[in-house]
Image (cartoon, grey):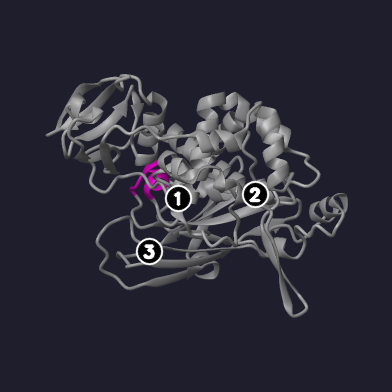
Amino acid sequence: MVGLALIAAAGIGGCRAIEKAEWRKRYLEADRGLSNITLTGEMSWKQSRPDGPDIELDEASIEARIIGSMENGRVEVRYPNGHQKQAEQLAQLLDQLLAYIQEEISAPLPGKVRLLLCLVEGRPRSIRFSIDLEAEGEQDVFTFPMVVDDPNETAEAMLLHNGPMPLYILVHELVELALVSPKIEPVALPDAQAPIGPFRYTSRNHTRWFRDGYASYAGFTAMQKQLSESAPSPSAEGQTPAMLHPTPCSSLAKVGSRIFRWDQYDPDDWNADYYNATLGMFLLIEKEHGRAAIRRMMRDLKGLDFPDGEAILDAANESLGADLKRLADDYTFPDWGLTCVSDNAAVRVVNVEPGSRADAAGLQENDRLLAINHRPTHVKAFYEAAVDRVRHDPAELTIERDGERITLDLPADPP
């Protein structure tokens, strides 16, 4: 899991005793920007059986093996010996995807993204890393690691399966950082802690539903785009695209409007249902109001005097003409009587309840579900989003059974 230490924000954010206009002035003028944020994390090796030792990577050890860099638009890729072609392809592909989410959902982005290709031999059990994000002048430069070991691996495969920075996580972190950056128009105020004498002040701004949810939605949108253009082979072993939040819709049905009070220091900080549910909230907004409404909402949220959770929720409701708390509480996830897991660019059926809609459709254990009404189900999150689009209506299911692709008809829910 990738973590962000929002150190810079702790000294300047959130105190209600400060006039809101003064807070905004201080935050926007903060010249520390993102220079004190450290990206830390730990990864396992591409879901394969490791045979090497644990290793640690920091920026200095990675840079020591860098021999050149390739740039395309806002993306720079620094590469070790033998990986120039990959760097060129990565810079071009990632810049295209970032431009897509910026246009499609009005995603805020930094001025520059730097990828450091980390050459790792063998298959270590785990890789721990620590990278400092930088700020150069007025342009934020967000720096992220990407592990490489095969100079022949395509840029598409690297983005979809690479650790510790596959496409979904990379876009998520980029967008969430941009949402709180004082050097980009800040859209959301982060939760923060700061020492005050012998005490520690905690500012709970309750923007996490928005920061995590929208950033995950941006990652989801980028993955949809990439997989629609270069879907991996369903039979390729170990090629399940990396997706951090597999159950957005079913988790939203469990959590409901409690996500709007979730914060960085909540006892449920690491509760997977909350992480998943925030993505589910944005998928629900897209389903109910469309992507054009999300673009409009993001434009309307810019320039809030004090962008805490309450202000963001009120502005989002006004922009969408909705009551998001009620929408979350009223939401249910349809039960098809089907249990699935992600499996090599599809979802694999592990259980079918007798007498259920899935049973009536003829689904069997170990079937690989490839699409629902022609919407690809490369990962479980895509599957849940597709199920939620159909809900109680009939649907066409595309599956793979014993290597053969066939179509099944899912009946409507009985009245």
| Residue 101 pos. (x, y %) | 56, 34
Q: Secondary structure at mark 1?
A: helix
Residue at image mark 3: 120
Question: For the residue marked with disc 3, what is the amino acid?
Answer: Val
Tell me how far mark 3 sits from mark 2, CA to CA: 37 Å
Q: Tell me which residue sits at (30%, 20%) in the image.
A: 412
| Quadrant assignment for the N terminus | bottom left
Q: Mark 1 Cα within 10 Å, few/some/many (few <14, many 20+)?
A: many
Q: Tell me which residue sits at (43%, 47%) in the image.
A: 245
* Viewer-nearest residue: 195 or 227: 195
- Is 158 inside the magenta-drawn segment? yes
Q: Secondary structure at mark 3?
A: loop
- Viewed as shown, does residue 350 lie left or right of 306? left
* Viewer-nearest residue: 126 or 308: 308
Residue 43 in view, yes or no: yes
Query: Which of labels 3 and 2 is toward the front?
Result: 2
Q: Quadrant of residue 195?
A: bottom right
Q: Which mark is residue 273?
A: 1
Q: Main secondary structure of the magenta part?
A: helix
Residue at image mark 2: 207
Query: Which of labels 1 and 3 is toward the front?
Result: 1
